[in-house]
Amino acid sequence: MTHSLGAEARTLLAMLRGQPRAGSHAERLQAFYAPQAAHYDRFRERLLQGRDELLRRLPLGPGDTLIELGGGTGRNVEFLAARVPGLARVELVDLCPALLAQARRRCGRWPNVHLVEADATRYRPAQAADVVLMSYALTMIPDWRPALHNAVAMLRPGGTLAVVDFCLSDTQPRWLGAFWRRWFAHDGVRLSREHAAVLRALLPAHEYVEHRAPVPYLPLLQVPYYRFLGAKPR
């Protein structure tokens, strides 16, 4: 219990300090996440909601290929543990070595899971994917438009782009949206109403739903998030 409280305190301290403003995107990520990587999932499990539902709905079958952009510590691969052995290939792409080090320890039992240190805006796999997943990653990518176009480009015709992330909801007051934008920006998370609009335009055949998640240590506030499943035209 003491270890858990200490780990949570260190994570909170890193979040209060915020993400560095100097350096490249990769350098900022490494500086921010390296001190908290080992405890990253324990704290965020309560905040990053909607992942389990999205992952249950992924149209993955035996022999399929899954690419996760911004895969971080590989936590989502654990959610998919029952299906991973039947997949042809899983590629976990992230720009932060500290998070990938956690993923390496977590995913080493699966020989078909491959870790790739690369930029989501430019990385291209050797073969097209059946599903591309972005789980709380889009808001952390400064050049998010190229990342989305790249995600769609690496899908096979008929493949699925699955996204879950925070958003700014039209059902909440603008002052609250401004609060969330500033609060998340401190840690390098960029909320935008444009994300959902661009996703819908890129993949007109889609499902989109919004929900709200409680925020640890801020019990009276709920942050909006969405789930998106879109099919690439054949």
Image (tube, rainbow, N blue to C red):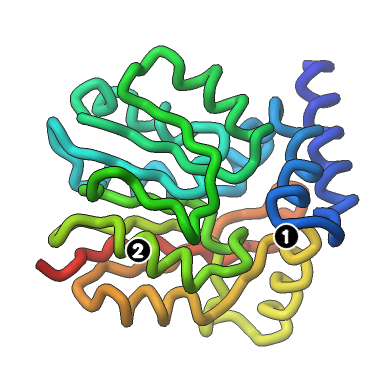
* Residue 145 sits above or below residue 117 on the image: below
In front of the other: 150 or 18: 150
> Crowding at label 1, few (<14), some or many (≥20) Cα neighbours within 10 Å?
many
* Horizontal side, residue 201 vs residue 98: left or right: left
Q: Residue at x 36, y 67 (%)?
A: 209
Disc 2 designates what residue?
A: 228
- Residue 230 is tagged as none
Amino acid type at circle 1 is: Gly
SS class of the residue under badge 1?
loop
Near mark 2 (Cα within 10 A), the count class, few <14, some 14-19 or many ≥20, is many
Secondary structure beneath disc 2?
A: strand
Q: Earlier in the sequence, mark 1 or mark 2?
A: 1
Q: CA distance from mark 1 to mark 2?
A: 22 Å
Residue beneath disc 1: 188
Q: Nearer the viewer, mark 1 or mark 2?
A: 1
Q: Is residue 212 above or below residue 82?
A: below
Q: Position of residue 167 (x, y in %)?
A: 54, 70
Which amino acid type corresponds to the residue marked 2 in the rendered image? Answer: Phe
Corner quadrant of residue 234: bottom left
Task: Locate residue 228 relative to residue 130 in the image: left or right.
Answer: right
Q: Residue 90 versus residue 216: which sits nearer the camera? A: 90
